[in-house]
């Protein structure tokens, strides 16, 4: 079921109509990526880039996230996340590479909406491509706490966190 706030937004792939220059989240690297690199990544199929826009302002970017395939060495994965993994030299995963919310929408639950949408997309794609978990590389301690608060497990001595696909399944299909 959608939250009332969620109904005022729509998620869609990044397109030419979206105003990348008007997006500012407070992290220069995330702003710069959207303005200069995101379109190239889409063309090259290096990342899927999704934006959240308001229903009544479809060109204005409220937030965005990127997804791509990645792999992890099984030894780096916490025991709590390793239970449902195949015994392969590399574990297939989906990288949630970037997640950003425009400054004027921060503190309004948009980050949680974006994360939920990203996890839904990752779960859907896992049925077609194969992925045992979602991986994030937190940009800072604040971001790491955000992901941990949403159930992500930290990898040792890094800003990388993981959320097993079986946990995501339980969130999506309670």
Image (cartoon, helix red, strand yellow):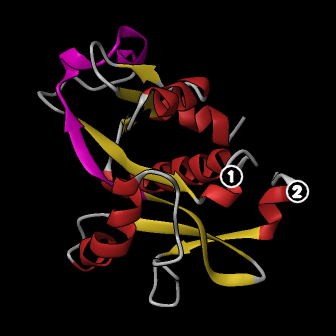
Answer left or right for 10 relative to 94: right
Examine the rendering and report whether any part of residue 109 can be seen. Answer: yes
Q: Quadrant of residue 59?
A: bottom right
Give the farthest residue toward the left.
89
Residue at position x 33%, y 71% in the image: 38
- In reply to whether residue 117 is colored magenta, the answer given is no
Secondary structure beneath label 1: helix
Q: Position of residue 14 (x, y in %)?
A: 46, 77
Residue at position x 43%, y 11% in the image: 80
Measured along the vertical axis of the image, is residue 166 above or below residue 25?
above
Examine the rendering and report whether any part of residue 48 can be seen. Answer: no
Q: Which residue is mark 1?
A: 110
Labels 1 and 2: the sequence-earlier one = 2
Residue at position x 21%, y 21% in the image: 74
In the image, the segment drawn in magenta is 66-83
Mark 2 crowd level (few <14, some 14–19, many ≥20, 10 Å Cα): few
Q: Which residue is mark 2?
A: 4
| Placement of the C terminus among the 4 image quadrants | top right
- In reply to whether residue 70 is colored magenta, the answer given is yes
Q: Position of residue 160 (x, y in %)?
A: 33, 28
Nearer the observer, disc 1 or disc 2?
1
């Amino acid at each position: 079921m959608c939250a009332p706030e969620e109904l005022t937004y729509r998620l869609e792939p990044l397109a030419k109509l979206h105003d990348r220059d008007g997006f500012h989240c407070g992290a220069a690297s995330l702003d710069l990526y959207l303005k200069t690199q995101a379109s190239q990544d889409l063309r090259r199929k290096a990342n899927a880039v999704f934006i959240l826009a308001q229903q009544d302002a479809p060109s204005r970017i409220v937030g965005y996230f990127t997804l791509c395939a990645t792999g992890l060495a099984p030894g780096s994965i916490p025991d709590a996340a390793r239970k449902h993994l195949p015994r392969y030299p590399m574990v297939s995963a989906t990288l949630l590479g970037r997640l950003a919310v425009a400054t004027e929408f921060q503190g309004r639950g948009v980050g949680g909406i974006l994360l939920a949408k990203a996890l839904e997309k990752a779960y859907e794609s896992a049925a077609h491509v194969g992925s045992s978990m979602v991986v994030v590389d937190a940009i800072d301690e604040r971001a790491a706490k955000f992901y941990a608060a949403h159930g992500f497990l930290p990898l040792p001595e890094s800003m990388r966190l993981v959320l097993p696909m079986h946990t995501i399944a339980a969130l999506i299909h309670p």
